Image: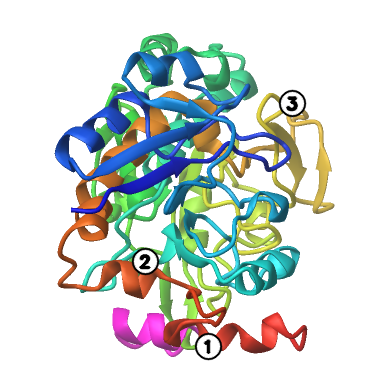
Amino acid sequence: MNTITIGIIREGKVPPDFRVPLTPKQCNEIQTRFPNVKVLVQTSPIRTFKDEEYQKEGIEIVENLNDCDIIFGVKEVPISYLIENKTFFFFSHTIKKQPYNRELLRALLAKKIRLVDYEVIKDKNNKRLIGFGRYAGIVGCYNSFLTYGLKTKTFELKPAHLCANRQEVEEELKKVILQKDFRVLLTGFGRVGHGAREIIKLLPIKEVSPEDYLTQSFDEPIFAQLEVEDYYGRKDDSQFMKSEFYSNPELYKSTFKCYVSITDMYIPCHFWNAKAPNILSQEDLQEENKRIKVIGDISCDIAGPIAATIRPSKIGDSIYGYNPISGKETDFMDRDAIAVMAVDNLPCELPKDASEDFGDELLKHVLPALFGEDPDNIIERGAETNFSGNLTDGFQYLQNYLEGKE
């Protein structure tokens, strides 16, 4: 049986990303589970797991990955790091025709590299198999409560990026103080939404149905998590049909306004289609009875469905204020300001935990198909480019993007 050599590339994107696709223990596990696979790790001064930690697990540290067959990274690999005729796994951020990565995709084709993009690795039912969404939800929800404590001057939490790990984050949550009629609303039930739930479930907050959230009074902190039909309705007021909404979202309108006067904190965790109506408008936030003080926008669609999300924020400076009257940024502590948390790389705040979670998914869903049988063709369907220097069949729609025509 021929040996397959895989490599972990050093992250080269600026600003730096400290995450890894596979932890030292996971690299060791790979070599145990797949005896014909050898793992090499390119030396790096920045990753959250140090070179020595890999070496302690028996993993060889190398200067270059030229001898590898398959190379794993996290973020976009700089063009200068690409090696011809190899298979690369990373988030390329090209499938939505992002203009800033057009040259990267051109280089992948020119070097005849097979790119398998994590974002499009899906099962036979077209459900994504791998991602950092869970930890985006975990960190984003924590940051939202941190923001609420600062905005209301009721408690202070240690920023997630200053915590050693998730365990310390959970200890910090014991400092949270909420008024008895506190209400928080989430939209979205994907990886991000479920990650956010993990944090809320650690707090003394009762879950209620969307209907009860709208119609009932409570003498304790509560939260509701909304499905898409809870905040969108058909323009002609006829019955909501989920399949139609996803195929023809222009037939629908937002009904979110009814929550504005009864919600203290809103945490968007949804996936939003740019063809769908906006969810929360500037006009909605101008209502005199508006109660929302904090929006923890984990989804972070800039100038999109949430009017208050006017820019991404940064780790270490994660909060800005939004004035709903002017529509402009202001000090988040201003009386009329909504405090907005909109960090767009949330998993980076807990890089060890996020990396371990991501690597577990690789081990469970991807590597068995990569090194063994792949009856559902998840690797083939996730490959954006091939060794012939062409886009694969599922990604021919990117041709005009490549040529600069769109």
Task: Look at the picture and state if 210 lies above or below 142.
Answer: below
Could you tell whether 201 is left or right of 89 in the image?
left
For the C terminus, the quadrant is bottom right
- Give the percent coordinates (x, y) of residue 197: 31, 38
Of mark 1 and mark 3, the one earlier in the sequence is 3
Tell me the distance, in whole angstroms, between the alpha carbons under discs 1 and 3: 49 Å
Per the rendering, the mark at residue 106 is none
**Label 2: which residue?**
228
Inspect the magenta stretch and tell me whether residue 237 lies in it: yes
Type of amino acid under label 2: Val
Which segment did they paint magenta?
235-249
Which image quarter: residue 236? bottom left
Residue located at (68% from left, 24% from top): 316
**Label 3: which residue?**
333
Task: Look at the picture and state if 128 lies above or below 174.
Answer: below
Per the rendering, the mark at residue 396 is 1
Residue located at (28% from left, 23% from top): 202
Type of amino acid under label 1: Gln
Which image quarter: residue 22? top left
Type of amino acid under label 3: Met
In this rendering, the label closer to the viewer, 1 or 2: 1
- Give the percent coordinates (x, y) of residue 126: 28, 72
Could you tell whether 240 is left or right of 29 in the image?
right
Which image quarter: residue 320? top right
